[in-house]
Amino acid sequence: MTATRTPAVLLVAFAAACLATACGATSDDDTGSTGGSASYAIDATFTIGLRDDPGTFDPYHSQLIFGEAYLAYDSLLNLAPDGEFVSGLAETWTADANGATFTLREDVTCSDGAPLTASDVAAAITFVSDPANQSPQYGVYTPTVSLTATGDDAARTVEVTVAEPFGFLLHTVGQLPIVCARGLADPDLLRTESDGTGPFVLTDVVPGQTYTFTRRDDYAWGPDGAGTDQPGMPKQVVLRIVTNESTRANLLLSGEINFALITGRDWQRLDAQGLDKVVVPSSGAWLWFNQVDGRVTQDKKVRQALVQSLDFEELVAVSTGETGSLSDGLITAEPKACPGDTVSGQLPGFDVAASEALLDEAGWAAGADGLRAKDGVPLTIDLHFVPSITPDYQPAAELVAQKWEELGIRVELTSDTFTTMNQFMFETSDYDVYLGGFGFGLPHQAVPYLSGPVPPDGTNLSGLHNAEYEELVAQAQALTPPEACEYWGRAEQALFRNLDLVPISNRPWPFYLQHAEARTSSTNFPVPTSMRVLR
């Protein structure tokens, strides 16, 4: 096994950011509290520990604030824990696969006191939905099909129409954080202040250290009409940049911060001290098999041999630090727009003898040294992983490499940074297998990564051409949930049966709380109106 190390450089792709931050995920235990009758502090400060400095609090230009943007920016709708939509900026709404109409509340104001108009909302949607503006929100909280958004200020209505059917308008446009007119016109001002309708206003920035927000006492249009007048609601929220996870854990234990994501082994000492946590499900280890011309993994027999040589139960434990579970589909976010298990029954079982037979059938014969070759060319697999996503990926990749080497395969194990990952996945397609999850929140978000043009002309990362998947996707996209879900589920299964992409594990991402209460949602880490500081 050969190890290759690459230097650390800048993170540039949103897809990689999703891997690192679990964007699009939601909580499977959506409250964090002390478990008893709470005694709330009055006008206290709620401090959140962040790993990275976003550089700007502009949600249309930074992918690093997806979970925190809603402190200052509201969406038209909010997704409740039961999967139902509740009001936000919009008090009523209708939608189908061809368009949506939102009627705004009449009392909403921006942080500078200006009333929010339907034209403001339409302009924000139009900006993010234009791929030329290169917003990281594009394709996440907007459709990837052309749309038109118009606002009627007198009627307080926003009309969104799409050029071709798109079934997730409420899940995308409905949950887009809305920047008010002044901030949309001058994004530079959002480096030091905010211009939104959210419950807090950005009032101070110390670059590389803190972002401080101050409560809006007139706020009354949160999820389902939630306001900021509840006991324990903090007067200020501070985002404190703490790059080292062990340091974040120490600050939680000392009470210097109230809320932070801890994904490494430090969770064990936090659990031992009885800290409350909100657990957010995320993808763990997946296997992406490159099928562009010339790759050995273009052969399904080779892919099946590689998969059947792995004990998934063992790999789940290693890839999640013994905290995870078997994957049940491409989407980990709860509540899912399309619930259900799409993996069970689609993958071949663990069988090393079958793996060896499949490689023999594919012409990769074992030599006297036990190593396999065909026509004098050794069977070599270039296996990539990104250890900075989670420390568990390295032992998982090493376990996979070991099992494949036991079949007589040479394995080149490559440890990547986010930047080198962007290069081999989005530019060169120079890899055989990638071990790592992806932050898909809705089924349609996966489509451009699993079909269409390959890099550098597109984002079909593995050069897939699965006709059954593409046909089912076309049927699904013309419908809205729940009718669309049958087709989305069958589309995923078509991928898994062909071993184009093999999801193995889900892992929990725990957000820990100290002297505080909070909830998460599909977009908020945490939900701003749920934050409480305890005495």
Image (tube, helix red, strand yellow):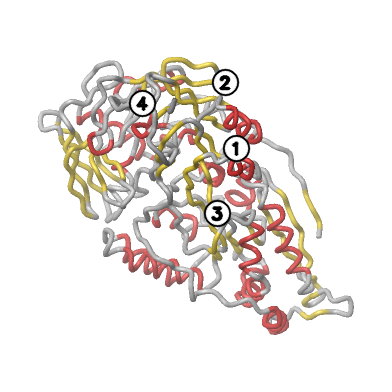
Q: Mark 1 points at which residue?
A: 11
x 66%, y 48%: residue: 386
Nearest to the observer: residue 512 or residue 281: 512
CA gap between label 1 and label 2 equals 19 Å
x 52%, y 62%: residue: 327
Q: Nearer the observer, disc 1 or disc 2?
A: 2
**Disc sitting over residue 532 in the figure:** none
Asked if disc 3 and disc 4 are in contact, CB closer than 8 Å, the reply is no
Image quarter where the N terminus lies is: bottom right
Q: Which of marks 3 and 2 is nearer the N terminus?
A: 2
Q: Residues within 10 Å of mark 3 (few under 14, many from 20)?
A: many
CA gap between label 2 and label 4 equals 23 Å
| Residue 422 x %, y % | 60, 46
Q: Mark 3 points at which residue?
A: 507
Vertical position of residue 289 compared to residue 457: above or below: below
Vertical position of residue 381 compared to residue 357: above or below: above
Q: How crowded is mark 2: few (under 14 residues within 10 Å), some or many (20 or more)?
A: some
As drawn, the residue found furthest toward the front would be 37
| Residue 312 x %, y % | 61, 68
Q: Mark 2 points at which residue?
A: 209
Q: Earlier in the sequence, mark 1 or mark 2?
A: 1
CA gap between label 3 and label 4 equals 31 Å
Q: Which of marks 3 and 1 is nearer the N terminus?
A: 1
Kind of residue at disc 4: Met
Kind of residue at disc 3: Arg
CA gap between label 3 and label 1 equals 23 Å
Name which quarter of the figure residue 118 lies in: top left
Q: Earlier in the sequence, mark 3 or mark 4?
A: 4
Q: How crowded is mark 4: few (under 14 residues within 10 Å), some or many (20 or more)?
A: many
